[in-house]
Amino acid sequence: MAADRVVVVGASMAGLRAAEAVRKAGYAGEVVVIGDEPHMPYNRPPLSKTALGAEPEDLAFRVPRHARDVTWRLGEPVTAADLAARTVTLAGGEVLGWSGLVIATGLRPRRLPLPGPDRCVIRTLEDAARVRAALRPGARLVVVGAGFIGCEVAAAARALGASVDVVAPERVPVERPLGRLLGAALRRRHEAHGVRFHLGTVPVAYRATSVLLADGTELPADLVVEAVGCVPATDWLAGTGLDLTDGVLCDHALRAGGRPDVVACGDLARFPNPLFDAVPRRVEHWTMATDTGKRAGTTLGRHLTGAGADETPFTPVPSFWSDQYDFRLQSYGAVGLGGEIRVLEGDVDDEAAVGYHRDGRLTGVVLLGLGGRYPHYRSLVVSGGLAVR
């Protein structure tokens, strides 16, 4: 079944960038991108921010010149892959052969195994539209999860006039990614806008018009949004022999399973970044979709054209942003690796730069405001500068 064809599974931003890079590398065969959603690739981060309920055309990415001859198979999930036969199987039973495979299926929302009525998540355009339709002034929203998506949804809901309660087991919002210092500061900002936090507890039951918490509190709810993280969408790769322990294990060129004809990119790619260390990790940041998509597509395209692998070290700098009310939070580097956290300038209740250090070296920076300081702190992260004194 092998064919002179590159199949990209995942019509995501990473999948789009990979298809473009395959073409730029000189591959002239057929390129097919398969996606389970009916939409062309679009920008997901705004879905939980002010773009709740946006139209597909508002968030769609422009298809670049190098990818205009790509074939798009949308609304057709892939259910299985056979690496030995070089095929993928679609939900309708069609088997498609390939000479190169790009794995770009991203993540799916984690769900709590609790009884009760259906609740919402925010991952797709349809998810965001459903939530937006329910967020009328006075609506009672319970957000389960106090990470970035949970906090962004809370901020967007308050701006629309909804009443908001946030439930999470942590001591402060965004504690896992950012630590207690910034988490406490973000909590104060949200509370100043009327958000109520219920921390150190979890829901134990969803009811028709309420959420029951482990501490006995019962919160009235017209709408519940679960924002408790995501897991790699790798079910269709079961039985392939790839390491799916946490996403898809790759080398520095984003080859999966030691195969030059299979690459992975986006949120599910687990790879080493020598900018920080040699440990393979997944990075769920917006910029990584572009960076890994380009790298994976280049790797595959060079293999298929006989150009050989690009052995240049792959050292992308992870970054993301979060808009909440009238402030923007920006992160650069690997903040999760920095166990020592200190304010580098400013005040966390106003504008500030917060540094994350490991073994005395800077691994990441979070900016609250201070957008003009981005080039300075990004350069410090790249150089590993600003030693702790």
Image: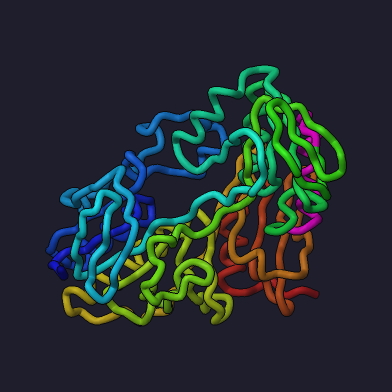
Above/below status of 275 relative to 79: below
Query: As drawn, which residue projects farthest toward the front?
Result: 115
Quadrant of the snapshot with the N terminus = bottom left
Q: Is residue 231 left or right of residue 215?
A: left
Front in this rendered view, residue 146 or 92 = 92
Q: Please provide percent x and percent y for residue 355.
A: 71, 63
Quadrant of the snapshot with the C terminus = bottom right
Above/below status of 104 relative to 383: above
Identity of the residue drawn at 68% across and 21% down: 139
Specify whether residue 347 is in view. Answer: no
| Residue 177 counted in the magenta span | no
Above/below status of 24 relative to 195: below
Identity of the residue drawn at 76% across and 52% down: 182
The image quadrant of residue 134 is top right
The secondary structure that most of the magenta stretch takes on is: helix
Query: As drawn, which residue projects farthest toward the top?
Result: 137
Identity of the residue drawn at 21% across and 54% down: 94
Q: Which stretch did the figure color magenta? A: 179-196
Q: Please provide percent x and percent y for residue 370.
A: 66, 48
| Residue 182 counted in the magenta span | yes
Specify whether residue 271 is in view. Answer: yes
User: What kind of colouring is applied to the model shown?
Assistant: rainbow
Q: Please provide percent x and percent y for residue 87.
A: 23, 66
Above/below status of 86 relative to 197: below
The image quadrant of residue 337 is bottom right
Q: Is residue 95 left or right of residue 354?
A: left
Front in this rendered view, residue 287 or 98 = 98
Q: Please provide percent x and percent y for residue 119.
A: 60, 36
Identity of the residue drawn at 26% across and 53% down: 33
